[in-house]
Image (tube, rainbow, N blue to C red):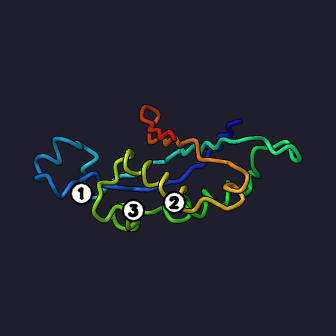
Amino acid sequence: MRLTRRYRFCASHRLHSGALSEAENRALYGKCNNPFGHGHDYVLEVSIRGPLDPATGQLAPVGVLDRLVNDAVIAPMDHRNLNLEVPAFAAAVPTSENLAGEIERRLREAWPPAFSDSSVALAGIRLRETKRNSFETAS
């Protein structure tokens, strides 16, 4: 069985690589290289998979998943400047690709024992940055 749950958070960032010149950054990232940054209303979908619990008829308690996502992702990233307030992006460019990878890493690191004990696994995430751009990880 697979369960996907949707969450939302807002964050700002500036796409700028210290490994590139100012001109290269402007050419590569365009308006996303604005020195003042810009924001997104991100939509995050977290998918888990595993066997149904025969006693509850559920894959996993949704409240456990909600707490995991809130504690590992939403609380530390919502209404934050990713470049300045999220340590993972002090040296890494906070592209949505990197953000998706960081979200997946945080979820795996904070994976609750209740899920591990029941063989529930992270199936992947989808991060929608805009109506035209979404990024997925798959396990």
- The answer to whether 132 is drawn above or below residue 19 in the figure is above
Q: Residue at x 39, y 62 (%)?
A: 81
Residue density around tag 2, few if under 14, some if 14–19, many if 20 or more, within 10 Å:
some
What amino acid is found at the position of numbered circle 1 in the picture? Pro
Of the numbered discs 3 and 1, the one sitting upstream in the chain is 1
Q: CA distance from mark 3 to mark 2?
A: 9 Å
- What is the quadrant of residue 14 in the picture? bottom left
| Outermost residue to the right | 55
Q: Nearer the viewer, residue 118 or 89?
A: 118
Residue occupying the point 62% across, 47% down = 121
* Residue identifier under label 3: 81
Q: Which mark is residue 35?
A: 1
What is the x, y in percent for residue 108? 54, 56
- The residue sitting at 58% across, 41% down in the picture is 123
Q: Amino acid at mark 3?
A: Asn
Asked if labels 2 and 3 touch by Cβ distance under 8 angstroms, the answer is no
Q: Amino acid at mark 2?
A: Asp
How packed mark 3 is, by other alpha carbons closer than 10 Å (few <14, some 14-19, many 20 or more), is some
User: Image check: 43 left or right of 19?
Assistant: right
